[in-house]
Image (cartoon, rainbow, N blue to C red):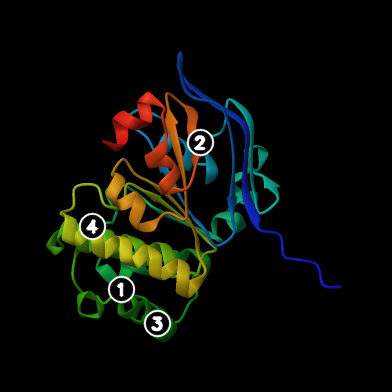
Amino acid sequence: MKTNERQDIIHVDDLSFTYGNEMVLDDLTLTVNKGETLVILGGSGAGKSTLLRLIIALIRPTRGRVTVFDNDIAFLSERQLRPLRGRMGFVFQGGALFDSITVAENVGYALRIADPKISKMEFEKKVIETLEYIEMRDFYSVFPADLSGGQRKRIAIARATITHPEIILYDEPTSGLDPIVSKRINQLINRLRIEQKITSIVVTHILQDAFEVATRMVMLKDGRMVFEGQSDDLLLSKDPYIQQFVR
């Protein structure tokens, strides 16, 4: 009899993070399943972005464990983390593009990190394919300063996906964008889940965007989880904080 493929690929167990005297995350436990888009909701200071940085080991936990692909990443060296990070993409809140290089060089940055000897032909082929996927082929030679906010976000997503990661972490991907552009970003996130089977964690404080992409939702308040479930359950919650957030 064939065994089922394991579905959970990220575990956060009793996770706490303290910055100075401030408890940013407090005994948080959650699981992320393969192929889902988990949305992390919460107000400013809830610990959402900190959680993303812990998952990709940009910072280390004060207490608890973060397990990604069955690896407890808290105690891994930078060298040991490199192949795991190669299986993940990160879309920073502001896009974090390099202004001194073109869109093509920004998108292909991870390719050069993974293979410094990549040929010019192979580099161009993969960058063009990725830009075509996000419908920005004509921006190959453009510099980030000449992009709109929505275009910068799409290029940031292209950079995160060019190495075909299994997981993408999004930090406020629609922050500062108008509703039409936000919808386009949300459609891209959904397309990546459906077509490329990418597992996503999306941090946002924008409820409408959360409903458009989430297959499951978690809400944080003061570093603690106050909700986990589906969007309909969130709307029906009697918790005063959640009611205030969704209305």
Which numbered dot is residue 134?
1
Residue 197 in the image, given as x and y percentages of width and height: 52, 69
Residue at image point 32% right, 46% down: 172
Q: How many residues crowd mark 1 within 10 Å: few (<14), some (14–19), many (20+)? A: some
* Amino acid type of the residue tagged 1 in the rendering: Ile
Residue at image point 75% right, 66% down: 4
Q: Earlier in the sequence, mark 1 or mark 2?
A: 2
Q: Residue furthest top?
A: 21
* Residue 112, placed above or below residue 208: below
* Amino acid type of the residue tagged 3 in the rendering: Lys
Secondary element type, mark 3: helix
**Which label lies toward us, 4 or 2?**
4
Q: Earlier in the sequence, mark 3 or mark 2?
A: 2
* Residue 222, placed above or below residue 196: above
| Cα–Cα span, label 4 and label 2 | 29 Å
| Cα–Cα span, label 1 and label 3 | 21 Å
Which numbered dot is residue 97?
none
Q: Which residue is mark 3?
A: 120
* Residue 19, placed above or below residue 97: above
Q: Name the image quarter holding residue 3.
A: bottom right
**Which label lies toward us, 3 or 4?**
4
Q: Which residue is mark 2?
A: 59
